[in-house]
Image: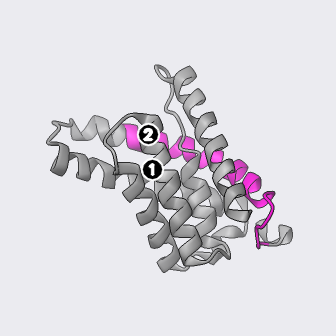
């Protein structure tokens, strides 16, 4: 039941992310709303198996929704979950500023990692500086939305973090 609620919330965030990307496509960068959810699970009290499996499914669904290279978001979300988990970033749950900083840094790491994977495996020719500008702007948009996503995931049934810990 708890995993189903997480997956349903992830699908809702993915749908919202897709709508935002379609509406703002030409003028503004679209935030990744699924990334802060994965970050919340990695710094929260979720088990490793539960967090990795939910991150994997959400990454796969993001790949399917985006229509890009299959496996790119899957690998990235699972990697970000594990990196944030290993770093032991429990302090980032305390306050909106830290949530935004965590989301910005993780989004930058994910974007640069995806650029590297695309360069190696897809053999796409990327203009690196403009691509880094897109990564940074999307990271800012993701960081701006991160506190809302953290609150949304916290309100789901089966979350183990207490409300007073969320700042």
Residue behind mark 2: 64
Residue 58, x across and y down, in percent? 52, 52
Q: Residue 151 falls in which quadrant of the image? A: bottom right
Residue at image point 64% right, 45% down: 145
Residue 165, x across and y down, in percent? 79, 72
Q: Quadrant of the N terminus?
A: bottom right
Relative horizontal placement of residue 75, taking residue 35 as reference (left or right): left
Callout 2 environment at 10 Å: few (<14), some (14 to 19), or many (20+)? some
Assign a secondary structure to mark 1.
Answer: helix
Give the colour scheme shown: one colour
Q: From this view, report whether residue 81 is shown above or below residue 107.
A: below
Residue at image point 66% right, 72% down: 44
Residue behind mark 1: 60
Q: Marks 1 and 2: in contact by CB < 8 Å?
A: yes
Residue 80, x across and y down, in percent? 45, 63
Relative horizontal placement of residue 129, taking residue 142 as reference (left or right): left
Residue 159, x across and y down, in percent? 76, 67
Q: Residue 89 falls in which quadrant of the image? A: bottom right
Q: From this view, report whether residue 18 is shown above or below residue 76.
A: above
Front-lying residue, 44 or 51? 51
Assign a secondary structure to mark 2.
Answer: helix
Q: Residue furthest front?
A: 1
Relative horizontal placement of residue 118, taking residue 7 as reference (left or right): left
Q: Which residues are magenta?
A: 134-161
Was residue 62 drawn as part of the magenta stretch in this picture?
A: no
Front-lying residue, 31 or 50? 50
Marks 2 and 1, how far apart at CA: 6 Å
Q: From this view, report whether residue 143 is shown above or below residue 26.
A: below
Q: From this view, report whether residue 26 is shown above or below residue 107.
A: above
Residue at image point 34% right, 51% down: 71
Relative horizontal placement of residue 135, taking residue 106 as reference (left or right): left
């Amino acid at each position: 039941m708890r995993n189903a609620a997480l997956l349903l919330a992830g699908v809702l965030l993915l749908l919202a992310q897709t709508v935002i990307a379609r509406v703002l496509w030409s003028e503004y960068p679209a935030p990744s709303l699924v990334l802060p959810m994965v970050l919340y699970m990695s710094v929260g009290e979720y088990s490793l198996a539960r967090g990795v499996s939910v991150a994997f499914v959400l990454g796969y669904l993001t790949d399917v929704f985006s229509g890009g290279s299959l496996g790119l978001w899957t690998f990235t979300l699972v990697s970000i979950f594990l990196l944030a988990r290993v770093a032991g970033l429990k302090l980032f749950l305390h306050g909106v500023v830290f949530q935004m900083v965590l989301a910005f840094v993780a989004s930058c790491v994910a974007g640069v990692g995806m650029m590297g994977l695309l360069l190696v495996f897809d053999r796409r020719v990327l203009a690196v500086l403009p691509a880094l500008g897109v990564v940074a702007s999307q990271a800012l948009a993701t960081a701006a939305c991160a506190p809302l996503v953290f609150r949304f995931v916290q309100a789901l049934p089966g979350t183990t973090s207490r409300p007073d810990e969320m700042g």
